[in-house]
Image: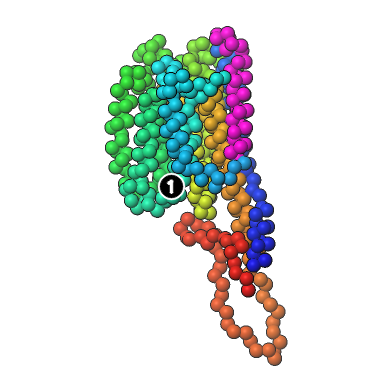
Amino acid sequence: MRDNAHQATRLDEIHGRFDPWLLGLVIAIATLGVIMVASSSIAIGEDLAVGRYYFLTRHLAFLALGLGLAIAVMRTELRTIEKYDRFVLVMCAGLLLLVFVPGLGRSVNGAHRWITLGVSNFQVVEAVKVIYIVWLASYLVRFRDEVNATWGAMLKPIGVAVVLVVLLLLQPDFGSSMLLLGATAGMLVLGGGHLKRMMLPILLLLPAVVLVAVIEPYRLRRITSFMDPWEDQLGAGYQLSNALMAVGRGELTGVGLGASVQKLSYLPEAHTDFIFSVLAEELGFVGVCLVVLLFAALVGRGLWIGLKCVEMRRHFAGYCAFGVSLMLGMQSLVSIGVNLGLLPTKGLTLPLVSSGGSSVMMTCVALGLLLRVSFELDRAQRQVARLRGETAVPAPAAPLPPTTQPPLPVAPATPVRGTSRLRQRVEPSFGAGSSA
């Protein structure tokens, strides 16, 4: 028993490290975001008489706050986060209802998406995205087998997502609603949901989604202007036509950093929703490819980390990685698609690149959660490697002298194999062995 306890102590002393590739990609995207916010917001700050570097200073301040929150998440054990799974679900609904509280909620252009925090406004859906991923990951861990086998277990998270989507549509926020539904479907698939069963609720929800998209006049105008922005270039197609002109001016290598013309009060929201168009104008096709590759690498690395966690039976960590990667991947894909005229305008920012407050902070929190997953994965891999080294098969003993009776035959030990999703993995137990 003493040997087992001593071995457990050595294993507990092993620490992990944050994934260097993931950390490098996050730093690269955040640095690019600071550069582009500085370039795209100078003219807007002068027009609003708030100073040339107002939006850059604001972006850096929220980035620093987000970094502090991310560090706090990175230092928190995932098992501690998992304990509050039911509480965070109530928090999701509560946050979305706060925007309708008089005196606390704030309306901008008829949209109730923000709450007032004194010095700044906070868009609650950004926090809901991260919190909802944590709840859904915990749910998939608790009902992993039932989700694949029963209708009830599979429909429950879809029902929760529909309730949250209804609250979002009351604000209204159609873009975030679609992100939430997309992340739910993706996590159910990666969590073992039955694909054929999932097709029925998806087919039933599609007509409702289409109806919501066209029932509001402003959403219908966005769709028609997306199909032909030049038909009403000075009206409904104004944003998209100017965004496409910015992209076209960039050509191969761009007009040069800081030399964009469209950001000079021609392109609305040049530092937020349409910052990618400014980037395409100033850095050209080369810059566009760089941004797409950075986000593709970030999402791919996150999904790879999640897969490795699931293979090691660390399902909660793996599902959290899947959720964060899917949410970031879909949001960046929609934002880039809108700027390139491939999708209707949704009002979604490009994560860590667009100027913003709550979006920047909560993106940092989501990435902090993903980095924490990578830390615990690396620590578990190191512990398993140490355990396998401690329990290695000893070297064969020296041959017995001729006068000694041969030992009784012993059955060969079962070889230790690597972890596989298709093979039951034997989990190591620390200090659970019995003494001789």
Q: Is residue 68 above or below residue 389?
A: above
Q: Toward the viewer: 69 or 364? A: 69
User: Can residue 343 be spotted in the picture?
Assistant: no
User: Quick one: 346 or 61, which is closer to the camera?
Assistant: 61
Image quadrant assignment for residue 213: top left
Q: Horizontal placement of 338 versus 427: left or right?
A: left
**Where's residue 273, x and y in %?**
48, 22
Q: Which residue is mark 1?
A: 140
Applied colour scheme:
rainbow
Amino acid type at image mark 1: Leu
Q: Say which quadrant the N terminus sits in.
A: bottom right
Kindly identify the residue that appears in the image at 50 percent across and 21 percent down. Answer: 116
Instruction: Give me the residue at 47% from left, 38% from top.
Output: 88
Tell me, yes or no, whether the highlighted magenta stretch contains residue 49: yes
Residue 403 is one of the magenta-drawn residues: no
Magenta highlight range: 45-74
Q: Residue at x 70, y 91 (%)?
A: 403
